[in-house]
Image (cartoon, rainbow, N blue to C red):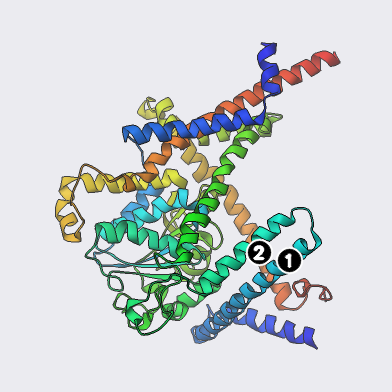
Amino acid sequence: MMRIVALAIASVAGLVMLLSPFFPAMESVGAQSSEIFNVIAAIAFILGAGSLVKVNLSRVGRRDTGWGYAFVTLLCFAITLIVGLGKIGVPPNPQFAATPWAGEKDAAGSAFAWIYEFILTPITSTMFALLAFYVASAAFRAFRAKNREAMLLLGTAFIVLLGRTFAGVWLTGGFPEWASGLRLENLSMFIMQVFNTAGNRAIIIGIALGVTATSLRILLGIDRSWMGAGGGSA
Amino acid sequence: MEGVLGILERLDRRWVFLAMALAVAGPILVMGITRKTLPETPTDASRAVFQVVQSLPRGSTVLLSFDFDPGSAGELEPMGVSMARQCALRGHKMVFISLWPLGGQMIDQTIKKVLRADFPHLQDGVDYVNLGFQTGNEQVMRVVLTDFKRAFPTTKAGRATADLPILSGIERVGDFALLAQVSAGYPGSKEWVQYVVSASGGKLPMVSGCTGVQTPQLYPYFPGQLRGLLGAIKGAAEYESLINAWVSDPANAAEMASAGADGGVSAVIPPKYLEAQRRMGPQLGAHLLMVVLILLGNVVYLAQRRSQRRAAA
């Protein structure tokens, strides 16, 4: 019975979303469905947080390999949650001076803003910056001209790498006007706008057709894999 | 020669890391000391972003969606700064939103850096507003198509959007003159194109700035659904150079003055408006090193293959 209810909800919600752009009378119903989804998505945040705590607590409890990292995760999660929900150090909101806790959780001077600016921002920026080092190492060890296709790929990479910097202008900027198409920056743009666009359009159209087929299977209740174990196909 | 090849063959990856650090740090130091940047030749896609914002009538209301976080701020923050700056210079009203949880803070930083610092006469809620983050990804896009204020009932500071002066006359996303979006991934430019621009029947013009990884995926939408496209830090630098050239042109002095830009036309551009162009130096160093490393790696590979063939013969 529960499976039938779930299938009915999925089919009706999916059909409403599918039809609402084509029928103006259904626009508000479509927006209503989207709002319901947003509420469910907000609840999913709570589920996600619960799952994070559960998984990491069990790793700490069992003293698994790397349990220290799990402990740090839990500690950071707890501190951020308390600081955010408790609005620690948040200055009062001048628009709602009489209302306690009306200030923004991440207003300048608050503990949450401090965590964001001096912990989160440097950490995420550092993680992203580390990519450059690993890409450099991979460039030295993995980008090998083993066959014709690999040579084409390498040639394209050289053109784009040089064409996207001042090196392209410096190396080929002196080419005469009639040969301007061979300048590295122009070649780079040509590759991006012609070869890349053609390939990507083919992929996008293929994906769209696949999504359409999969969506129809779900709407019609043929594909039930999204229900997890016990769902299966009709 | 064998000796050099042997060294390259056994090269510890930490030497590669060191070379990358030097290739990036060198240009940063040189550009920091000399305060000079490399010249930029804007591509059509970057020029289009500048021209679309310029061509809007003064006082148009622009929706700016900052869908990124600090992880990609190195590439994308200069784009957001430049978009806000050009809108302010042109006298456009700016409604900032984000579909990324940390995007609200990125907007705050941009407002502080650009609007409060150089356009202090602009009023929050009248000339610009930060509506902050809204959860729901594509579903938020679906809702703004029919009822913008329903998706964003309050500002980030908690004010109701129903009576905000800047949103008077805005019922749905199609009422904005332009959607300017900065994208770090999902949800991002692709979703905005698919769920909003296409659904609006092409009535809502959109320009986008995105990371280098996303750029090849977004080119198929330019110049159709996307009227302009800034690809990675290179696109940001080109866009920044276009705005700086416009600001430095005495012919635009009257317009600058009417926009209330602090300082008016100036040949000296503040460092915060040269960030993207300054970052092209480290990019040049890193790209050149990558080319050299690929070449060296292939020299080693070819030498290895030759020696294997000789041994087999």
Which quarter of the picture shows residue B11?
A: top right
Q: CA distance from mark 1 to mark 2?
A: 8 Å
Given the image, on which type of amino acid does mark 2 rest? Leu
Q: Label 2 marks which chain's residue?
A: A
The residue under the point 20% across, 60% down is B259
Residue B76 spot, x, y in % from top left: 45, 52
Residue B151 spot, x, y in % from top left: 47, 78
Q: Residue furthest top?
A: B1
User: Can you identify the residue that label 2 sits on?
Assistant: A74
Q: Residues within 10 Å of mark 1 (few under 14, many from 20)?
A: some
SS category of the residue bearing label 2 = helix
User: Can you identify the residue that label 1 sits on?
Assistant: A57
Which sits in the foreground, A164 or B157?
A: B157
The N terminus of chain B lies in quadrant: top right
- Tag 1 near tag 2, CB within 8 Å: yes
The residue under the point 43% across, 60% down is B106
Up-down: is A189 above or below B68? above
B87 left or right of A141 in image: left
Which sits in the foreground, A48 or B197?
A: A48
SS category of the residue bearing label 1 = helix
Q: Label 1 marks which chain's residue?
A: A
The C terminus of chain B lies in quadrant: top right
Which quarter of the picture shows residue A207?
A: bottom right
Which quarter of the picture shows residue B111?
A: bottom left
Given the image, on which type of amino acid does mark 1 rest? Leu
Up-down: is A194 above or below A18? above
A17 left or right of A5 in image: left
